[in-house]
Image (cartoon, grey):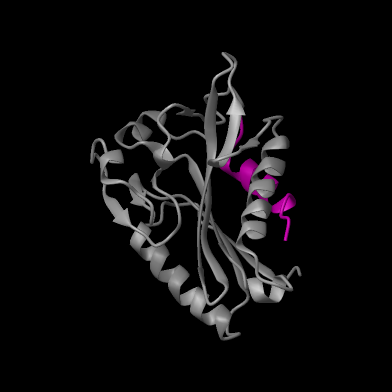
Amino acid sequence: MSNVEWTFSDFPIEYEDALSVMEDTVADIKNDKSPEQVWLLEHPSLYTAGTSAKPSDLIDKKFPVFETGRGGQYTYHGPGQRVGYVMLDLKKRQQTPDIKDYICKLEQWIIDALQVFDIKGERREGRVGIWVVMPDKSEAKIAAIGVRIRHWVSYHGISINLNPDLSHFGGIVPCGISEHGVTSFEDLGVKATMEDLDEALKASWPF
């Protein structure tokens, strides 16, 4: 199925505004009033708390915090990070709707897009998101995943760190994992623009 509408926002979108658009779009997709959507954007600096977020993981409330119905724990969004909101009708795309399969495809989407830039993204058992092995053999997260499903229509989605201020992650325990760090294209010495990343994401689209 290729009738997915892509939107690319080149200015920061307020989180509450994005959430409102997603809620309306999900309802329209369910009622066959809208095509499925992929929305690539940036947010101003903020933290979001997923349904499994622990209050103790909010270390320093240096940015606005938004409670959200997506899965997962705390994450950071901000300039230099590409957020991909994916709104798909899973009933139409899967014979039997399967959230695990859907998340697996999102992971592969990120992995394939990173490969365009010779970044080896990997899954880790028990850890959500996509990880890279750093030069010192430590591991760091380069992309996060958090989804919500309503009436078998997906929303929320992924985020990939292009060149955000990584110190901003210090206000939280990202995704509840304190023993590993976060990284970005810039941190890895990979030069790319947001437009380059958008092109790679569109070319790697797995659905």
Q: Residue at x 49, y 33 (%)?
A: 163
Task: From the viewer's side, name the closer residue of 158 and 72.
Answer: 72
Above or below: residue 119 compared with residue 189: below
| Spot occupied by residue 191 in the image (x, y as percentages of width and height) | 61, 28
* Magenta span contains residue 19: no
| Spot occupied by residue 167 in the image (x, y as percentages of width and height) | 36, 28
| Spot occupied by residue 140 in the image (x, y as percentages of width and height) | 52, 28
The magenta segment: 191-207
| Spot occupied by residue 173 in the image (x, y as percentages of width and height) | 36, 36
* Residue 108 appears left or right of 194: right
Q: Residue furthest front?
A: 126
Q: Quadrant of residue 92?
A: bottom right
* Residue 148 appears left or right of 137: left
Task: From the viewer's side, name the closer residue of 38 and 112.
Answer: 112
Q: Quadrant of residue 55?
A: top left
Q: Residue at x 47, y 27 (%)?
A: 180
Q: Residue at x 67, y 30 (%)?
A: 119
Above or below: residue 71 compared with residue 44: below
* Residue 95 appears left or right of 52: right
* Magenta span contains residue 199: yes
